[in-house]
Image: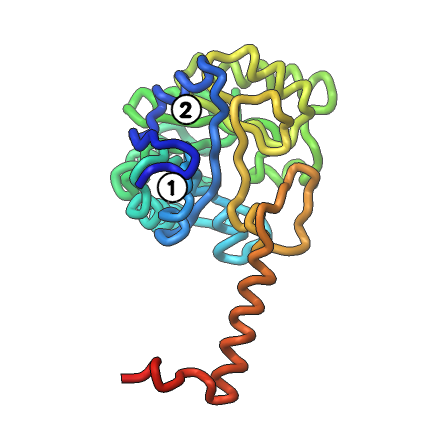
Amino acid sequence: MAGYLSGDTRKVTTHRLIEMKQKGEKISMLTAYDYTMAQLVDGAGMDIILVGDSASNVMAGNVTTLPITLDQMIYHGKSVVRGVKRALVVVDMPFGTYQAEPYEGVRNAIRMMKETGADALKLEGGEEVIDTIRKIIGAGVPVMGHLGLMPQSINKYGTYGVRAKGEAEAEKLVRDARLLQEAGCFGLVLEKIPAALAARVAAGLTIPAIGIGAGGAVDGQVLVVADMLGMTQGFSPRFLRRYADLHTVITDAIGKYVADVKSSDFPNESEQY
Protein backbone atom coordinates (compact mmCIF):
# COMPACT_ATOMS: atom_id res chain seq x y z
CA MET A 1 0.00 0.00 0.00
CA ALA A 2 1.38 3.42 -0.89
CA GLY A 3 2.09 5.76 1.98
CA TYR A 4 -0.52 8.43 2.68
CA LEU A 5 1.91 11.27 1.99
CA SER A 6 4.22 9.51 -0.45
CA GLY A 7 4.16 6.93 -3.22
CA ASP A 8 7.48 5.58 -1.94
CA THR A 9 6.74 2.01 -0.83
CA ARG A 10 10.37 0.97 -0.30
CA LYS A 11 11.08 -0.58 3.09
CA VAL A 12 12.53 1.95 5.51
CA THR A 13 15.97 0.88 6.75
CA THR A 14 18.49 2.27 9.21
CA HIS A 15 20.60 3.39 6.23
CA ARG A 16 17.67 5.28 4.70
CA LEU A 17 17.07 7.12 7.98
CA ILE A 18 20.61 8.49 7.91
CA GLU A 19 20.07 9.48 4.26
CA MET A 20 16.90 11.30 5.30
CA LYS A 21 18.86 13.31 7.87
CA GLN A 22 21.48 14.18 5.26
CA LYS A 23 18.76 15.41 2.89
CA GLY A 24 16.99 17.37 5.62
CA GLU A 25 13.87 15.20 5.31
CA LYS A 26 12.04 14.98 8.65
CA ILE A 27 11.41 11.49 10.07
CA SER A 28 7.96 10.50 11.37
CA MET A 29 7.74 8.01 14.24
CA LEU A 30 4.74 6.73 16.19
CA THR A 31 4.05 3.91 18.62
CA ALA A 32 1.90 0.85 17.96
CA TYR A 33 1.38 -2.23 20.11
CA ASP A 34 -0.90 -4.54 18.10
CA TYR A 35 -1.50 -5.83 14.57
CA THR A 36 -4.57 -3.74 13.72
CA MET A 37 -3.07 -0.41 14.80
CA ALA A 38 0.25 -1.28 13.15
CA GLN A 39 -1.51 -1.79 9.80
CA LEU A 40 -3.16 1.62 10.11
CA VAL A 41 0.00 3.45 11.17
CA ASP A 42 2.11 1.80 8.47
CA GLY A 43 -0.48 2.36 5.74
CA ALA A 44 -0.61 6.08 6.59
CA GLY A 45 3.06 6.43 5.64
CA MET A 46 4.92 6.28 8.95
CA ASP A 47 8.72 6.00 8.71
CA ILE A 48 9.35 4.32 12.09
CA ILE A 49 6.95 2.36 14.28
CA LEU A 50 8.07 2.09 17.89
CA VAL A 51 6.78 -0.84 19.92
CA GLY A 52 7.36 1.15 23.08
CA ASP A 53 7.54 -0.12 26.62
CA SER A 54 4.82 2.51 27.03
CA ALA A 55 2.66 -0.56 26.33
CA SER A 56 3.04 -1.03 30.08
CA ASN A 57 0.91 2.09 30.57
CA VAL A 58 -1.28 2.14 27.45
CA MET A 59 -2.06 -1.57 27.10
CA ALA A 60 -1.60 -2.98 30.61
CA GLY A 61 -2.64 -0.04 32.80
CA ASN A 62 0.55 0.17 34.85
CA VAL A 63 1.59 3.50 36.35
CA THR A 64 5.15 3.23 34.97
CA THR A 65 6.96 1.33 32.21
CA LEU A 66 8.93 -0.74 34.74
CA PRO A 67 6.61 -3.77 35.20
CA ILE A 68 6.42 -4.87 31.55
CA THR A 69 8.37 -8.07 30.90
CA LEU A 70 10.57 -9.38 28.10
CA ASP A 71 7.91 -11.91 27.10
CA GLN A 72 5.24 -9.20 26.96
CA MET A 73 7.40 -6.95 24.78
CA ILE A 74 8.11 -9.88 22.45
CA TYR A 75 4.34 -10.52 22.17
CA HIS A 76 3.64 -6.88 21.26
CA GLY A 77 6.65 -6.76 18.94
CA LYS A 78 5.69 -9.79 16.86
CA SER A 79 2.06 -8.60 16.70
CA VAL A 80 3.18 -5.26 15.23
CA VAL A 81 5.68 -6.78 12.79
CA ARG A 82 2.91 -8.91 11.25
CA GLY A 83 1.01 -5.74 10.34
CA VAL A 84 3.87 -3.71 8.83
CA LYS A 85 5.11 -3.59 5.23
CA ARG A 86 7.11 -0.37 4.93
CA ALA A 87 8.01 1.22 8.29
CA LEU A 88 11.14 0.39 10.28
CA VAL A 89 9.95 -1.46 13.41
CA VAL A 90 11.86 -0.68 16.60
CA VAL A 91 11.10 -2.53 19.85
CA ASP A 92 12.01 -1.25 23.32
CA MET A 93 14.12 -3.51 25.52
CA PRO A 94 12.26 -3.43 28.85
CA PHE A 95 13.67 -2.45 32.23
CA GLY A 96 15.91 -5.09 33.78
CA THR A 97 16.82 -6.89 30.56
CA TYR A 98 20.10 -5.09 29.80
CA GLN A 99 21.15 -2.95 32.77
CA ALA A 100 22.75 -5.59 34.97
CA GLU A 101 25.33 -7.27 32.76
CA PRO A 102 26.38 -6.81 29.11
CA TYR A 103 26.17 -10.45 28.06
CA GLU A 104 22.71 -10.81 29.57
CA GLY A 105 21.75 -7.78 27.48
CA VAL A 106 23.17 -9.40 24.34
CA ARG A 107 21.29 -12.66 24.98
CA ASN A 108 18.01 -10.81 25.57
CA ALA A 109 18.54 -8.59 22.52
CA ILE A 110 19.17 -11.57 20.26
CA ARG A 111 16.07 -13.32 21.62
CA MET A 112 13.95 -10.23 21.00
CA MET A 113 15.18 -9.90 17.42
CA LYS A 114 14.70 -13.62 16.65
CA GLU A 115 11.23 -13.90 18.17
CA THR A 116 9.72 -10.56 17.08
CA GLY A 117 11.20 -10.20 13.61
CA ALA A 118 11.76 -6.51 14.39
CA ASP A 119 14.25 -4.34 12.50
CA ALA A 120 15.95 -2.84 15.57
CA LEU A 121 15.82 -2.36 19.34
CA LYS A 122 15.83 0.76 21.53
CA LEU A 123 17.69 1.08 24.84
CA GLU A 124 17.67 3.90 27.39
CA GLY A 125 20.88 5.40 28.74
CA GLY A 126 24.31 6.61 27.75
CA GLU A 127 27.67 6.04 29.40
CA GLU A 128 26.18 3.75 32.05
CA VAL A 129 25.11 1.14 29.48
CA ILE A 130 27.52 1.90 26.63
CA ASP A 131 29.47 -1.37 26.98
CA THR A 132 26.24 -3.33 26.66
CA ILE A 133 25.17 -1.28 23.63
CA ARG A 134 28.55 -1.89 21.94
CA LYS A 135 28.24 -5.64 22.48
CA ILE A 136 24.63 -5.77 21.25
CA ILE A 137 25.58 -3.86 18.10
CA GLY A 138 28.65 -6.09 17.76
CA ALA A 139 26.31 -9.08 17.72
CA GLY A 140 24.58 -7.61 14.67
CA VAL A 141 21.57 -6.00 16.34
CA PRO A 142 20.78 -2.41 15.27
CA VAL A 143 20.28 -0.14 18.29
CA MET A 144 18.51 3.19 18.73
CA GLY A 145 19.52 5.16 21.82
CA HIS A 146 17.30 7.16 24.19
CA LEU A 147 18.45 10.16 26.27
CA GLY A 148 16.86 12.94 28.30
CA LEU A 149 13.82 11.87 30.28
CA MET A 150 14.20 8.10 30.51
CA PRO A 151 10.98 6.56 31.86
CA GLN A 152 12.76 3.40 33.04
CA SER A 153 14.65 5.63 35.50
CA ILE A 154 11.57 7.46 36.78
CA ASN A 155 12.04 6.27 40.36
CA LYS A 156 15.52 7.81 40.32
CA TYR A 157 14.24 11.14 38.99
CA GLY A 158 11.06 11.22 41.06
CA THR A 159 9.41 13.41 38.42
CA TYR A 160 8.47 13.46 34.74
CA GLY A 161 9.73 17.05 34.48
CA VAL A 162 12.04 18.45 31.79
CA ARG A 163 15.57 17.01 31.97
CA ALA A 164 19.00 18.56 31.33
CA LYS A 165 18.02 22.12 32.23
CA GLY A 166 21.22 22.46 34.27
CA GLU A 167 24.64 22.81 32.64
CA ALA A 168 26.15 19.63 34.11
CA GLU A 169 23.29 17.36 32.99
CA ALA A 170 23.17 19.07 29.60
CA GLU A 171 26.89 18.51 29.00
CA LYS A 172 26.56 14.86 30.04
CA LEU A 173 23.70 14.44 27.56
CA VAL A 174 25.84 15.88 24.76
CA ARG A 175 28.68 13.49 25.67
CA ASP A 176 26.30 10.54 25.90
CA ALA A 177 24.86 11.32 22.45
CA ARG A 178 28.35 11.27 20.95
CA LEU A 179 29.13 8.01 22.77
CA LEU A 180 26.00 6.39 21.35
CA GLN A 181 26.94 7.48 17.84
CA GLU A 182 30.52 6.24 18.27
CA ALA A 183 29.22 2.92 19.59
CA GLY A 184 27.31 2.42 16.34
CA CYS A 185 23.72 3.47 17.15
CA PHE A 186 21.79 4.37 13.98
CA GLY A 187 19.73 7.04 15.75
CA LEU A 188 18.44 8.18 19.12
CA VAL A 189 15.38 9.58 20.86
CA LEU A 190 15.64 12.82 22.85
CA GLU A 191 12.78 13.06 25.35
CA LYS A 192 11.61 16.18 27.18
CA ILE A 193 14.73 18.34 27.07
CA PRO A 194 15.13 22.07 26.24
CA ALA A 195 14.69 22.75 22.53
CA ALA A 196 17.99 24.62 22.27
CA LEU A 197 19.90 21.67 23.74
CA ALA A 198 18.13 19.21 21.43
CA ALA A 199 19.02 21.39 18.44
CA ARG A 200 22.67 21.41 19.54
CA VAL A 201 22.72 17.62 19.93
CA ALA A 202 21.04 16.96 16.56
CA ALA A 203 23.36 19.37 14.74
CA GLY A 204 26.42 17.67 16.22
CA LEU A 205 25.47 14.15 15.10
CA THR A 206 25.55 12.37 11.76
CA ILE A 207 22.79 10.00 12.96
CA PRO A 208 19.18 11.21 13.29
CA ALA A 209 17.83 12.50 16.60
CA ILE A 210 14.08 11.99 17.05
CA GLY A 211 12.40 14.27 19.55
CA ILE A 212 9.46 14.03 21.92
CA GLY A 213 9.08 17.28 23.79
CA ALA A 214 12.45 18.37 22.39
CA GLY A 215 11.46 21.13 19.97
CA GLY A 216 11.39 21.29 16.20
CA ALA A 217 15.09 21.54 15.32
CA VAL A 218 15.68 17.78 15.62
CA ASP A 219 15.50 15.28 12.75
CA GLY A 220 12.04 13.88 13.46
CA GLN A 221 9.25 13.49 15.99
CA VAL A 222 7.67 10.64 17.95
CA LEU A 223 4.43 10.47 19.92
CA VAL A 224 2.39 7.76 21.63
CA VAL A 225 -0.43 6.78 19.26
CA ALA A 226 -3.17 6.66 21.92
CA ASP A 227 -2.26 10.19 23.03
CA MET A 228 -2.13 11.84 19.58
CA LEU A 229 -5.40 10.16 18.58
CA GLY A 230 -7.11 11.48 21.70
CA MET A 231 -7.92 8.05 23.11
CA THR A 232 -6.39 8.94 26.48
CA GLN A 233 -7.56 11.65 28.84
CA GLY A 234 -5.93 13.47 31.74
CA PHE A 235 -2.53 13.63 30.02
CA SER A 236 -1.84 16.93 28.28
CA PRO A 237 1.86 17.82 28.25
CA ARG A 238 2.91 20.86 26.24
CA PHE A 239 4.50 18.72 23.50
CA LEU A 240 1.34 16.70 22.76
CA ARG A 241 -0.81 17.66 19.77
CA ARG A 242 -4.08 15.72 19.55
CA TYR A 243 -4.96 14.94 15.92
CA ALA A 244 -8.34 13.38 16.75
CA ASP A 245 -10.79 12.93 19.63
CA LEU A 246 -11.26 9.18 19.48
CA HIS A 247 -12.25 9.06 23.14
CA THR A 248 -15.50 10.81 22.26
CA VAL A 249 -15.96 8.97 18.94
CA ILE A 250 -15.46 5.53 20.49
CA THR A 251 -17.51 6.24 23.63
CA ASP A 252 -20.41 7.58 21.55
CA ALA A 253 -20.30 4.59 19.19
CA ILE A 254 -20.27 2.06 22.02
CA GLY A 255 -23.03 3.94 23.84
CA LYS A 256 -25.17 3.83 20.69
CA TYR A 257 -24.55 0.08 20.39
CA VAL A 258 -25.64 -0.45 24.01
CA ALA A 259 -28.80 1.58 23.41
CA ASP A 260 -29.61 -0.31 20.20
CA VAL A 261 -29.18 -3.68 21.91
CA LYS A 262 -31.34 -2.62 24.86
CA SER A 263 -34.09 -1.32 22.54
CA SER A 264 -33.93 -4.40 20.28
CA ASP A 265 -33.06 -2.12 17.36
CA PHE A 266 -29.93 -4.22 16.77
CA PRO A 267 -29.90 -6.54 14.94
CA ASN A 268 -32.58 -5.60 12.41
CA GLU A 269 -33.96 -7.94 9.74
CA SER A 270 -31.16 -7.19 7.25
CA GLU A 271 -28.56 -8.06 9.91
CA GLN A 272 -29.83 -11.61 10.42
CA TYR A 273 -29.47 -14.90 8.52
State the residue lying farthest toward the front: 270
Q: Earlier in the sequence, mark 1 or mark 2?
A: 1
Q: Which residue is mark 1?
A: 42
Q: Which residue is mark 2?
A: 133
Residue 235 visible in image: yes
Q: Badge 2: how crowded within 10 Å, few (<14), some, or many (20+)?
A: many
Residue 270 in the figure: left or right of residue 179: left
Q: Badge 1: how crowded within 10 Å, few (<14), some, or many (20+)?
A: many
Identify which residue, 56 or 118, lies in the foreground: 118
Question: Which quadrant of the figure contains the N terminus?
Answer: top left
Q: Position of residue 42 (x, y in %)?
A: 38, 41
Q: Position of residue 164 (x, y in %)?
A: 68, 24
Secondary structure state at the residue bearing disc 1: helix
Check the image and report above or below for 1 versus 194: below
Residue 106 in the figure: left or right of residue 97: left
Identify which residue, 100 or 198, lies in the foreground: 198
Query: In which quadrant of the rendered view does residue 12 lie?
Result: top left
Q: Position of residue 48 (x, y in %)?
A: 42, 34
Residue 93 visible in image: no
